[in-house]
Image (cartoon, grey):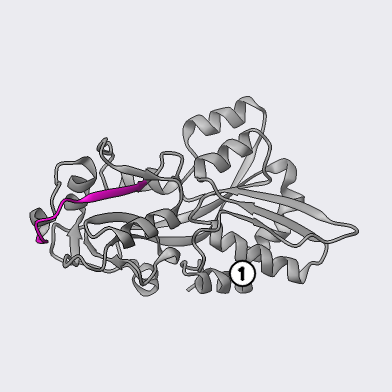
Amino acid sequence: MKTKVILIALTLYTGMSFAQKLKGSDTVLPLAQKEAESYMKADKNAKITVTGGGSGVGLAALVDNTTDIAMSSRKIKMDEKIKLQDAGRAYKETIIAYDALSVIINPGNKVTQLTREQLEGIYTGKIKNWKEVGGDDLQIVVYSRESSSGTYEFFKEHVMNKKNYASSVLSMPATGAIVQSVSQTKGAIGYIGLAYMDKAVKAVKVSYDQGKTYIAPSMATAKDKTYPIVRPLYYYYLTTVEKTVKPFIDYVLSAEGQKIVEQVGYVPLTK
C-alpha cells in the first residue's frame, strides 16, 4: 500500500453526476479511497474526492460546510459539537469499521513488548532510553501524529491516560511519514493504524494488565478483542446532505463494503 498518498483525485464522469467530498482522518484515508473507487465502478454517475489531513481537519471542514463527509478516527469533541450547533447544522455519526492501533519500532530494536505504563512513560518523557525497558543502551526517538490527528487524541486518552506528550516528541503530518521515520531510525517508536503496517517496521506486543499478558496487533486479536488498543472509525455528515451521501455510506456498511474493510487491513463491523 502506498502510504504517502494524501490526496486522491478519483475518476470524473460526464453527464449526470453526484459529487461528494470526503475529508479528514489519515487513518481512514486508505479505506475511504478503496471504498470510493469500488463504489464508482458500480455507479458511473458518482464522483467522489477523498483527502486526508487529520480528523480535526475533516470535522472543521464539516463545520465550515466544505466537505460532505468528515472522516474521523475519534469521536467528535464537545467544542466541535457546539460549533455545529451554533451554525444550525445537525449531523449524524456512523461507525464504519474498527482499527487496531499498532505501536511500531525499528526492526533492529530487540524489544518485543511494552506495557501501557511503559508507553505512557516513553511518550511523557519519563523513559528516555531503551535500556529502561529491556532494550539496548540507545536513546528513544519518539514519533507522534500532529495534534489535529484523531489518532494523536486517541493515543493520548487511551494509552497515555490523558497525560501530556513530552515537548521532545516529534510530530509528523501523516501516518506514512511515521512509518518511514521509524524504519530509518534504530531508536525510534511510533503508532499507526493496522492497515499501515509494513515490513520496514516492527509491531510490539502490548500489555494492559501490568505485564501479565502481552498481545500483538492483528486482524484476529482485534476481532476477538484481546488486543487492548482497538478503536472505532467514523463518518460524520450533515443531515442536509443525507440523501446524497447515504447510498455511499450504505455501500460501506454492506457486506461488500465490509469485505473491503478487511482487505485494506481494518476490522469489519460484521464477524
Residue 34 or 210: which is nearer the viewer? Answer: 34
Q: Mark 1 — residue?
A: 257
Quarter of image, res 48: bottom right
Residue 135: x and y in percent read 11, 61
User: Which of these two is toward me, 243 or 207?
Assistant: 207
Q: How many marks?
A: 1
Instruction: Judge whether residue 226 can be spotted in this image.
Output: no
Q: Is residue 209 left or right of residue 132?
A: right
Seen at 47% across and 74% down, the residue is 271
The residue positioned farthest toward the top in the image shown? 86
Q: Residue furthest right?
A: 15
Crowd class of label 1 (few under 14; some 14 to 19; many from 20; radius 10 Å): many
* Residue 68 drawn at (x, y percent): 68, 46
**Residue 122 lies in magenta, yes or no?**
no
Query: Is residue 181 toward the left or the right of residue 236 in the image?
Result: left
| Relative to 219, residue 229 above or below | above
- Seen at 21% across and 56% down, the residue is 187
Amino acid at dot 1: Gly
Residue 143: x %, y % from top left: 31, 49
Residue 135 lies in the magenta-colored region: yes
On the rendered structure, is 118 left or right of 10? left
Nearest the viewer among 184 and 268 is: 184
Q: Which range is magenta?
A: 134-144
Instruction: Please identify the dominant SS of the magenta region.
Output: loop
Q: Residue furthest front?
A: 184
Query: Which element carries disc 1, helix, strand or loop?
Result: helix
Task: Tell me which residue sits at (51%, 70%) in the image.
Answer: 264
Residue 29, quarter of the rendered image? bottom right
Residue 67 in view of the camera: yes
